[in-house]
């Protein structure tokens, strides 16, 4: 449908808790998901949430095959996740570099749960129930944070590990918008 403008850090909508979806399989929901797909693809994102394109609804999409922004990332299956619930499995926390379409050109080390159980629904109202770890768990937590008004810089524990991608990784060809 359309590549939408991505809201950037500082936009008030990005700090709000998104509204719950109450109706599935509607033309409006399908159009929103198409716009999310088009926008994520155009920007080489690993995921995107509806609030990032100015829509305050509990909808996120994610998926990674080969991505120039995350050249070493493991594969994550394409997923539409609506009204998610996350539950950490254990207390193990892993630090990892993250970027965000709403914080262009920057990266930071963010602590996230290493293993995760998440549930929710797809666009048709079918239940999703997964146990995940590694990069998949990181991506889900990052995108679900957007649905709760949290951006990754708010989770950074050590700001000395936050900065512009081209300064932090001058010898690497990591594409960031």
Image: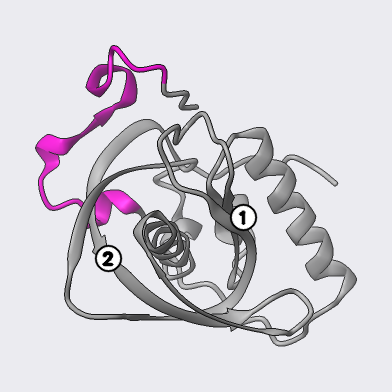
Q: Earlier in the sequence, mark 1 or mark 2?
A: 1
Q: Secondary structure at mark 1?
A: loop
**Image location (x, y in percent) of residue 27:** 89, 69
**What residue span does the magenta drawing correspond to?**
152-173
Res. 127 mark:
none
Q: Is residue 89 magenta?
A: no
Extreme residue in the right direction: 27
- Left/right placement of residue 40 relative to residue 8 reads right
Q: Residue at x 13, y 41 (%)?
A: 159
Query: Which is more toward the observer, 5 or 111?
Result: 111
Query: Which is more toward the observer, 132 or 85?
Result: 132
- Left/right placement of residue 64 relative to residue 116 reads right
Res. 54 mark:
1
Mark 2 highlights which residue? 114
Q: Residue at x 69, y 52 (%)?
A: 36
- Residues packed near mark 1 inside 10 Å, few (<14), some (14 to 19) or many (20 plus): some
Q: Residue at x 58, y 53 (%)?
A: 63
Query: Which is more toward the observer, 19 or 95?
Result: 95
């Amino acid at each position: 449908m359309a590549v939408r403008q991505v809201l950037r850090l500082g936009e008030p909508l990005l700090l709000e808790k998104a509204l719950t979806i109450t109706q599935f399989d509607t033309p409006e929901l399908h159009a929103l998901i198409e716009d999310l797909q088009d926008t994520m693809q155009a920007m080489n994102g690993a995921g995107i949430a509806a609030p990032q394109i100015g829509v305050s609804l509990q909808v996120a999409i994610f998926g990674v095959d080969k991505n120039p922004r995350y050249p070493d990332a493991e594969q994550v299956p394409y997923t539409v996740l609506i009204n998610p619930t996350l539950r950490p499995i254990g207390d193990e926390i892993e630090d990892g570099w993250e970027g965000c379409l709403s914080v262009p050109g920057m990266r930071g080390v963010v602590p996230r749960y290493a293993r995760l159980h998440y549930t929710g629904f797809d666009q048709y109202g079918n239940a999703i129930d997964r146990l995940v770890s590694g990069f998949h768990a990181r991506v889900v937590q990052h995108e679900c944070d957007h649905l709760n008004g949290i951006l990754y810089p708010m989770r950074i524990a050590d700001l000395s590990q936050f900065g512009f991608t081209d300064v932090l990784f001058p010898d690497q060809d990591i594409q960031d918008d």
